[in-house]
Image: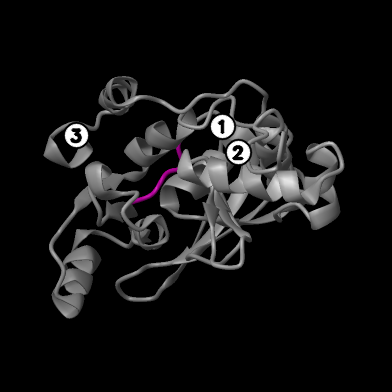
Amino acid sequence: MSAETDTSWDEDVRVAVYRAFAEHGRPPTAPELADAAHGSLAVAKQALHRLAEQRHLVLDAREHVVMAHPFAAIPLGFAVMGTGTLWWGGCAWDAFAIPHLVKAEPEVLVATRCRGCGEPKALLVGDKAPPEGDLVAHFLVPVARMWDDVVHTCANQRLFCGESCVDGWLTETGQDKGYVMDLATLWRLAAGWYEGRLEHGYTRRDPASAAEYFAKAGLSGPFWS
């Protein structure tokens, strides 16, 4: 079987990508990828492309892993610091998800800036209860369009001081309002969304189960369909 058709190592490669991010805050190195694919970097690279097609991760033009939600290899507005690891959080959703997914880091410091006024913000986010505060999250791109350009989508899931900062930013940029939620709703959205992603056998939610999950988090309507 050629590297192009051998899919038997795809799940090992996927887990290697996610665990490298979880444990080290970075994507796996070439030797780590090869180890996950029985010593073959060619097989690992083909696996990465299939995983990208299945929306398990995002590659750039050089075949480098840019995102493996909730982790990112590029800065998109959030730094997430645990006791021993520093991550780029791909967006507000992903930054809040990391302490739920990485069991060794049940509380993290999420640092960002208000997308509207630029004021720096820092929040302690844990896996037991949502953080307090009046900040809001604004998601620009609706669910049905999120994977059209997923890096753009994640770069526009940001925290703001309040709705006045959201409105000011939208006016300045000429964009239509997306969806605004408080910190408690954002925390509920993030809490279980990526459950199991670090383990073998993980499957992505289908549209029906995703809609059910959103509803339990308190999110409904056309934006979430």
Residues packed near mark 1 inside 10 Å, few (<14), some (14 to 19) or many (20 plus)? many
Q: Which residues are magenta?
A: 130-134
| Left or right of residue 138: residue 204 | right
In 3D space, how far apart are the residues under numbered discs 1 and 3 (Cα atoms)? Answer: 27 Å
Q: Mark 3 is on which residue type?
A: Ser
List the residue tagged with mark 3: 225
Q: Mark 2 is on which residue type?
A: Pro
Residue 178 location (% of width, % of height): 19, 54
Q: Could one spot residue 70 in this view of the protein? A: no
Task: Give whichever of 26, 30 is nearer the camera.
Answer: 30
Quarter of the image where one finds residue 218: top left
List the residue tagged with mark 2: 99
Q: Main secondary structure of the magenta part?
A: loop
List the residue tagged with mark 1: 127
Quarter of the image where one finds residue 91: bottom left
Whether residue 77 is in magenta: the answer is no
**Residues at marks 2 and 1 touching, judged by CB atoms closer than 8 Å:** yes
Nearest to N terminus: mark 3 or mark 2:
2
Foreground label between 1 and 3:
3
